[in-house]
Image (tube, rainbow, N blue to C red):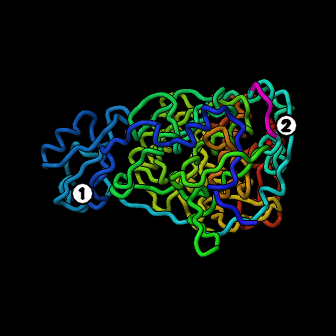
Amino acid sequence: MKFSPRRFVACIATAGALCALSSPAALGEDLVSPTLHSGETSHQVVARILDGHGADIAQRYGLTLVDSFAAEVGEEIAVLSDDSLDAEQILYLLEGDGDVLDSEAASHVALLGDGSAVDDGTALDLLRQGTVTSECYDGSFRQEVWSGFGDQQATAIIESRTAQEISNGCGNAVVALLDTGVDPRHPMLREALVDGYDFINRRAGVPSEWANLNQSVSAILEQSVSAILEQSVSAILEGEGDLLVLDASLAPITGPDPSINLDGIDVPPYFGHGTMAAGLIRVTAPGARIMPIRVFDGSGQAHLYNIIRGIYWATDQGADIISMSFSTDKSSRELRRAIRYAHNRGVLLVAAAGNRGQRERAFPASYWEVTGVASTDFNDQLSEFSNYGQAVASIAAPGSAVISTYPGGLFAAGWGTSFSAPLVSGTFALMLDNQKPRTLWERYELLFQIRYGADNIDDLRGYVIRGRRLNVRGAIELQ
């Protein structure tokens, strides 16, 4: 059976939420800020300068100060541009200026998935019907949880429900999720959400994924320093009777009663990505608080500056964990500094290993401060699309045909390291309910516990450090 994300959809939410899904045009005007969506990559640089000197630097060299924010004490990070100069020429101008501490050329990153087709029927064949209850589920979700989500194959493999039963709590950590936003009305998420920030529309609060329905084509095409999410929430196109997949795959197909049809609704290719990532954190640590930070639009693109700023912001707002379901094959000095800033302040960092199916470094997963996560299937084999190697994958977790929340009170099946990483983030959140790390060593202990509590899978040796696949129960038992 082949399926399209426009066809097999289930409704378990209120009529109001479904009306929003079926009427995207009624959601308001396009609110996308053009600030970081204009110009070309070749004409921009990201510079670290002495705090308060951004405007002076721009005036000194006839540049445009696109945006800036205060980073570490006495320093700010700025985007500078000039349509008449290329990045190398701007860097030359800034070289030797005492107010400029560092600068780098903006780069356009286009990460492509492997294009593997969905394993037809896998997600549907393994769905568990009915509802599931547990102390953590009942106390955190405050309503019935569909078994296809709360008792799915992925959660059984990593023994998350057993871990919740023996844990001292259900998770009480704050997990910052750098993604496309979330559906704030989803019944499985709304009790867990805390205020985050929308760095595209420049708004505090809970950034709604519905804003992604208002992206204009020109805003997508004119993005400058951009990074494309390398996950499975991508368009599935039908042509000549064949299933064609861009990147990997997402299919909003699952639920107790298929009743809503998305045919004819023009949703962006990555619409739902953040909601799915949030759902996987939630099902692993039901008591965790999720802080959504919107840096990616519905096309799966983000300005690198916004990603960097999001890491600083989440750290300063008290996030315990930062979950990053994206990757790029190009390192950035400022991204590296942002990661180090968060790490030095006690934040646990998790990132997807990437979906190119290659042994290669990917960032931020390859930074030593970050737990990089590869994807496995239900047979504990490395997923075909998953990157691998000790330089990028600290651990593996299920990422093929996992079931998670989808906007409109729906659920979806997803494939990609995007969906492996949140399971690890959720595990850290559950562990932090038992033990709040106060020192660097105590933070390392959590990393050791999650790795040595994992299952040793012979078929993963050589692909993931020590062939380890996440086991939430094992991690909790080592505390």
Q: Main secondary structure of the magenta part?
A: loop
Q: Which residue is mark 2?
A: 131
Q: Position of residue 194 (x, y in %)?
A: 57, 27
Query: Which amino acid is tagged 1?
Result: Leu
Few, some or many C-alpha atoms within 10 Å of disc 2 (few <14, some 14-19, many ≥20)?
Answer: some
Q: Nearer the viewer, mark 2 or mark 1?
A: 2
User: Going from the N terminus, do you reach mark 2 or mark 1 first?
Assistant: 1
Write the start and end of the magenta stretch as one range: 142-146
Query: Which amino acid is tagged 2?
Result: Thr
**Occupied quadrant, residue 19:** top right
Q: Is residue 449 left or right of residue 406?
A: right
Please indicate, yes or no, whether residue 359 appears anywhere in the rendered image. Answer: no
Q: Position of residue 183 (x, y in %)?
A: 58, 37
Q: Residue at x 23, y 52 (%)?
A: 81
Few, some or many C-alpha atoms within 10 Å of disc 1 (few <14, some 14-19, many ≥20)?
Answer: many
Residue nearest the viewer, comparing 474 with 171: 171
SS assignment at label 1? helix
Q: Which mark is residue 91?
A: 1
SS assignment at label 2? strand
- Whether residue 379 is situated above or below residue 190 in the rendered picture: below
